Image (spheres, rainbow, N blue to C red):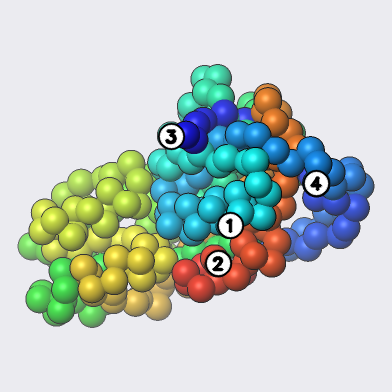
Amino acid sequence: MKRVRPAVVALSAVTLVFTGCAGQSETVDTDPAPSVDAIDGDITVFAAASLKTTFTDLGARFEAEHPGTSVEFSFAGSSDLVAQLISGAPADVFASADTKNMTAAVDAGVVAGDPVDFASNTLTIVTAPGNPDGITSLAELADPDVLTVICAPQVPCGAATASVEAASGTDIPAVSEESSVTDVLGKVTSGQADAGLVYVTDASGAGDAVTAVPFAESSGAVNTYPVAALSESDNEATARAFAEFVAGPVGRDVLGRAGFGAP
């Protein structure tokens, strides 16, 4: 049975180069890597909703690589997860869909060590299968007759939506603003909306349930995903090991095949 708890990313005596929203930065962490013998027991990972498929896969792979471990996940909008962590929710690792919410967690003192960027994502339009309304551009979502659903502005996918609206001069009269990208996808797949703005990875994961409509403006709002172990973790070694696993070769492979970009 898997469960929920917090912890610290400290990558082992190597130089990691990663890119945040403000540009490229370089961090050297000299803390020793967790001993293999210490990687055991349960951890809880709080992760952005857009990571559900990939992190579920990575959790199973991590457990197989480290017998005796158990990884439980709590998936939701990054802003909701940060609010829970600040309120004292027990967890060991936090993976955010943007650097803004990770910074909020760092500033609140729930993160130990430096977060590490491990992936990136961009938006796409999704419609019902076959795109029955013939939507071909972001500008068409400004038509009030097109029922469009977006993420709320405090959620990373909502912040990205606001960025592309501002950059393109498009004002989308959304019929609802959802608390996670999976909720937006659900409104489109259930027929409650004509279109929605979700990450390209969510559109890909939905398969034939939606049609994706790429738009050029999406390149102006790339979300970078950081991961960190949490300061109040009851299982620091395993939390650190999982965060390193996500940012390492196996994590990059799984995330890349799901459509995530490099950080």
> Given contact means CB atoms under 8 Å apart, are the residues at marks 2 and 1 in contact?
yes
**Of callouts 3 and 2, which one flags the residue occurring earlier in the amino acid sequence?**
3
**Of callouts 2 and 1, which one flags the residue occurring earlier in the amino acid sequence?**
1
Q: Position of residue 44 (x, y in %)?
A: 56, 35
Disc number for residue 254: 2
Name the residue beneath numbered marker 1: 61
**On screen, 218 above or below 197?**
below
Question: On the picture, is 116 further left or further right than 154?
Answer: right
Spatial separation of the CA atoms under disc 4 and disc 3: 33 Å
**Of callouts 3 and 1, which one flags the residue occurring earlier in the amino acid sequence?**
1
Residue appearing at x 10%, y 74% in the figure: 133
Residue 15 appears in the picture as rendered: yes
The quarter in which the C terminus is drawn is: bottom right
Name the residue beneath numbered marker 4: 36
Disc number for residue 157: none
Spatial separation of the CA atoms under disc 3 and disc 1: 27 Å
Give the number of the mark in front: 3 or 2.
2
